[in-house]
Amino acid sequence: MKKKIFIWIWAVLIAVPFFAEDVVYLNTDQFRARIFDYKTERDWVYKGDKPCVIDFYTTWCGPCKRLAPIMDELSQTYCGQVAFYKADTEQERELAYVFGISSIPQVLYIPVNGKPMLLKGLYPKEEIVRIIEEFLLAENKE
């Protein structure tokens, strides 16, 4: 019996990382296909089936570099519940223009239903978790 429990625990610990979701790098065309097509739609209608978080960043930004491991960790924590994306504002200038991204980092929180919320600056992990729990996942818990 102990051997079976040990094997089961070992299998879970080995297998879980393979099923976890990583942060996905998003370009403008992918944004329009997966999130919202701002060229054809006037009113916000999210295309996804689970909430998402989009980190607008650049490679040289210090606060963006500090935010990256937090987003990586949260993408594992909320695997299957929330999709995590990154959009490089220097590579995806059109997307940055559409959302008025003039300073970085900025993070766009998109619930399945309702309007998205865009926040400027680097927030502590605890605050990001609170936003995810209260803004993105609260409607699923009711």
Image (cartoon, rainbow, N blue to C red):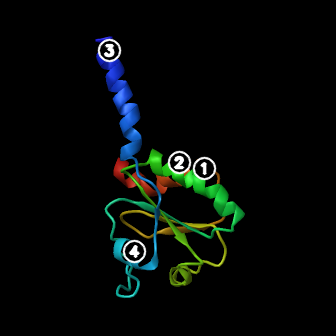
Q: Residues within 10 Å of mark 2 (few under 14, many from 20)?
A: some
**Residue type, numbered disc 4:** Gln
Q: Say the numbered circle drawn on residue 30.
A: 4
Q: Residues within 10 Å of mark 3 (few under 14, many from 20)?
A: few
135 with respect to 105 (left or right): left
In the displayed structure, 119 sits above or below 140; it is below
Q: Say the numbered circle drawn on residue 73.
A: 2
Quarter holding the N terminus is top left
Residue at 33%, 71% in the rendered image:
47
**Residue type, numbered disc 3:** Lys
109 with respect to 37 (left or right): right
Q: Say the numbered circle drawn on residue 114.
A: none
Q: CA distance from mark 3 to mark 2?
A: 31 Å
Q: CA distance from mark 1 to mark 3?
A: 38 Å
Q: Say the numbered circle drawn on residue 3.
A: 3
In the displayed structure, 13 sits above or below 52; it is above
Q: Are marks 2 and 4 in contact (CB under 8 Å)?
A: no
Residue at 41%, 74% in the rendered image:
31
Q: CA distance from mark 3 to mark 4?
A: 47 Å
Q: Residues within 10 Å of mark 1 (few under 14, many from 20)?
A: some
Q: CA distance from mark 2 to mark 1?
A: 10 Å
Q: Are marks 2 and 1 in contact (CB under 8 Å)?
A: yes
Q: Residues within 10 Å of mark 4 (few under 14, many from 20)?
A: few
Task: Give the labeled residue for mark 1.
Answer: 125
Q: Earlier in the sequence, mark 3 or mark 2?
A: 3
Labels 3, 2: front one: 3
| Residue 137 location (% of width, % of height) | 41, 53
Q: Are marks 3 and 4 in contact (CB under 8 Å)?
A: no
Q: Earlier in the sequence, mark 3 or mark 4?
A: 3
Q: CA distance from mark 2 to mark 4?
A: 23 Å
